[in-house]
Image (spheres, helix red, strand yellow):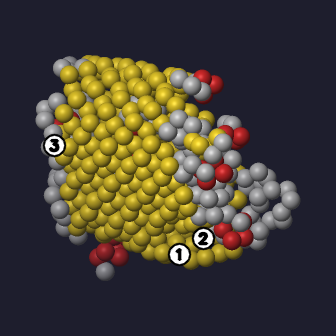
Amino acid sequence: MKLFEEICVGLLLLPVAPLWSQVDTTPTAPVPAVTGVQSSSSDQMMTPPPVSGQSYPTAPTAGERSNYLRGGVAFASSYTDNALGSLNGYPVSDVSYSIWPTLALDESTSRLHIVSTYAPGFTFYQRETYLNEANQTAAIDLQYRLSPHVSISARDGFQKTSSVFNQPDPTSAFAVSGGTQVANFSVIAPIADLLSNAGNVGMTWQFAANAMVGASGTFANLHYPNQAEVPGLFDSSSQGGSLFFAHRISKMHYIGVTYEYQRLVSYPTVGQNETQTHALLFFYTLYASSRLSLSFFGGPQYADVGPQYFNTQSPAAPGFQSWNPQVGGSMGWQGRLTNVAVSYSHMISGGGGLIGAVKLDSATASIRQQMTRKLNGSIAAGYAQSNVLGSALLGSDNGHTLSGTASLQRQFGERVSLQLGYTRLHQDYSGVAVLAETPNTNSEFVSISYRFYRPLGR
């Protein structure tokens, strides 16, 4: 009865709390409240990973720095055996060279933590020089504790690239999230102009000693400026929102419920395909220690698929409705020298370039180990099975992506580092022309970087 009263009070009082852009502000991983934003009370609740909207940290705690201005430049070269897909029955290989100036600001106060990063990249190809292009990567993550019990945050990431293999840090593509709403970027055109943007905003309010409510909104956009480079793939966008209630049973155990809405749109040759979903999910999080958490969620998800358009010659396929289970789980461990994150989810998600929304089974894992004071290694892998909703009506084929990256990084002094790595990508999408004939891509890369750190306010 007490739990029921807490839920009612929270939902009644939530509308009168300050309103703004939404997302969580407390950490996904079981570390102290957001790095650099100290809780005003030892009774401050954390926002469980299923509803936090954050990815698990990628660096061991020993590697964290705040209140720093960071900058530098990285020079990288990579070889790929599948630069252009198949020509005359054989994949075309190429070597690329990239330069990445970077600038990042990480600033913390007792109530605010903001991290902003900008990295303009320039990539040159040895053979196919017409692929040369300027790239852009930018991100901002803001977390603000408005009062001892009300927190807000917003984050956004933008990327303009000609190749998924040319990035300041190739392993960053394997961010692991325990969330119930995650953008789907699993279908990959190895070398093609691409604009992507994903973000979320939200608020959490701890209105009682062991009860919290929150609201969040998410969005993602995927755009191919040159459609001729990616036959069989299409632009897409998604918007979503959620409301949640979390109850802390004890210091280690959290339970809760969340309602979620999604609007998933893809843009084929003519018109658009739109799917709307509603889900009621229950979640549980175990904070086994200050560094280890386990989370699970599950519940029904309803999908309303609108009429589907593919081209001017075929009539619209009729819409339909369906009920599906949505389930998932994640684990995060952030040690002094080791960082591990694993997640799995089954849900209806955006197509990520396919003709419509999909039933998505995805799994991601990331391990980073500080081997010595100057040497660290990382392994990251991901798997995604995409089954297009109404694929029989659309004449579309389902498919899957399997990818992985392994790398070693050696530090020389305080500012120079060398990184070596290998990426393997396998994609089985027989209905996507740009991927059908050359499903496998291998890439080896090497980069040397110079970075500086300057303390702020010291």
Residue at figure coordinates x 31%, y 57% from the top left: 342
Residue at the limit of the structure toward the bottom, as seen here: 1
Residue topped by disc 2: 303
Quarter in which the C terminus is drawn: top left
Packing grade of label 3 (10 A; few <14, some 14-19, many >=20) is: some
Disc with the residue nearer the chain's start (3 vs 2): 2
Residue at figure coordinates x 56%, y 33% from the top left: 162
Residue at figure coordinates x 54%, y 66% from the top left: 359
Q: Position of residue 50 (x, y in %)?
A: 37, 60
Of the residues tagged 3 and 2, which is closer to the observer?
3
Rounded to the nearest angstrom, the CA distance separating label 1 from label 3 is 40 Å
In the displayed structure image, the side of residue 290 where residue 390 appears, left or right:
right
Displayed quadrant of residue 274:
bottom right
Q: Position of residue 23 (x, y in %)?
A: 43, 50
Residue topped by disc 3: 337
Q: Amino acid at mark 2?
A: Ala
Residue topped by disc 1: 324
